[in-house]
Amino acid sequence: MSRLRIGVIGAGMIAQIEHIPNLLRLRDKFDIRAVCDPSATARKFVHEYFMVPVLERPDQLLATPLDAVLIASPDPLHHEQVMAALDRGLHVFCEKPLCYAPADIDQIIAARDRAERVVQVGYMKRFDPHYEAALKLMPGTAGELRYISVEVNDPDAWPFVRHHAFRREADVAQSIVEDGRRKQAEQVARAVPGRLDDLAFRGFCTAYCSSLVHDVNAVHGLLDRLGLRDGEIVGAEIFANGDGGLGTVRLPGGKALWNMVHLAVPALADYRETISLYFDDAILRLV
């Protein structure tokens, strides 16, 4: 296989600590042509530390000869940048969330099909060996399923990144920051019916879209194996000043319930994540 010419949009912490080093380790498969970011501090660090070309704007990056892009920019920019990359005929790997609203995802699916390119979202849990082993242990149907429990407590990234070299500075132009906030508000409004107060808005964008969305994706893979489609949302709650989120889904047939809870505990260097499936005569637990 020839090396893919790839560009990276976004040079923040996740790109500096995970994506760029991983692409460089896989240099037999990927050729990083450029990394773009509006932060001069991030560009300087990436250029000097990783010795890769840097650019300021995504349009400059997309104008270079590429086969694929990796999108690690702030969440509200994902939709437009994925669409722009597909319009250029490029394959796309995008950080989660792909976008906020189902209608926006439908647009991306249509653009992907027109371009005949791959769009992949960074849901790494489906590639975990424990997850793959769990799929093999699942029964063929959901007849014996009674309950699914997802519990996550999360200190955010600091215990896992502080020993890495990275740079984060607030040197992005205020106009760019404000434009991102405006786009986020518009996209969340399309995703969630009715007006959200500040607490619910923050909970949706953080507890749900920045954390639990990983587990939602993983559970959907397990449900697919059981032959279950989407259920009905019957409960939701934001708590702990937006650092906690809870959601409850009634699965088809009404015989089983899926409950999820996430709590950010910023001062505690402890991360725990458990997905448990309760059947009539067995428990399957992923930790």
Image (tube, rainbow, N blue to C red):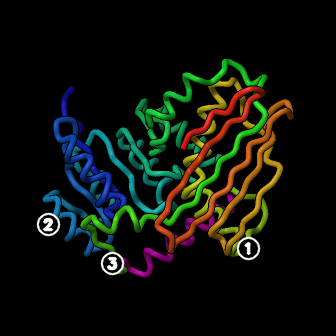
Q: Which residue is mark 1?
A: 197
State the residue in front, 112 or 208: 208
Which residue is under mark 3?
169
Q: Is residue 277 above or below residue 16?
A: above
The part of the chain drawn in magenta is: 171-190
Q: Secondary structure at mark 1?
A: loop
Which label sits on residue 55? none
Q: Position of residue 79 (x, y in %)?
A: 50, 53
21 is higher (above) or lower (below) than 281: below
Q: Residue at x 74, y 43 (%)?
A: 258
**Quadrant into which the C terminus falls:** top right
In the image, 197 versus 14, the foreground residue is 14
For disc 1, the neighbor class at 10 Å (few under 14, some 14 to 19, many from 20) is few
Q: Is residue 9 visible?
A: yes
- Quadrant containing the N terminus is top left
Residue at left 51%, top 70%? 268
Main SS, magenta residues: helix
Callout 3: few (<14), some (14-19), or many (20+) C-alpha neighbours within 10 Å? few
Report, in whole angstroms, how far the alpha carbon at label 2 lies from the one at label 3: 16 Å
Amino acid type, residue under disc 3 in the picture: Glu
User: Does residue 167 appear to the left or right of 211 in the view shown?
Assistant: left
- Depth order, front residue of 108/251: 251
Residue 205 seen from this side: no
Q: Which residue is mark 2?
A: 48
Spot occupied by residue 68 in the image (x, y as percentages of width and height): 31, 41
Residue 175 covered by magenta stretch = yes
Camera-side residue of 203 and 196: 203
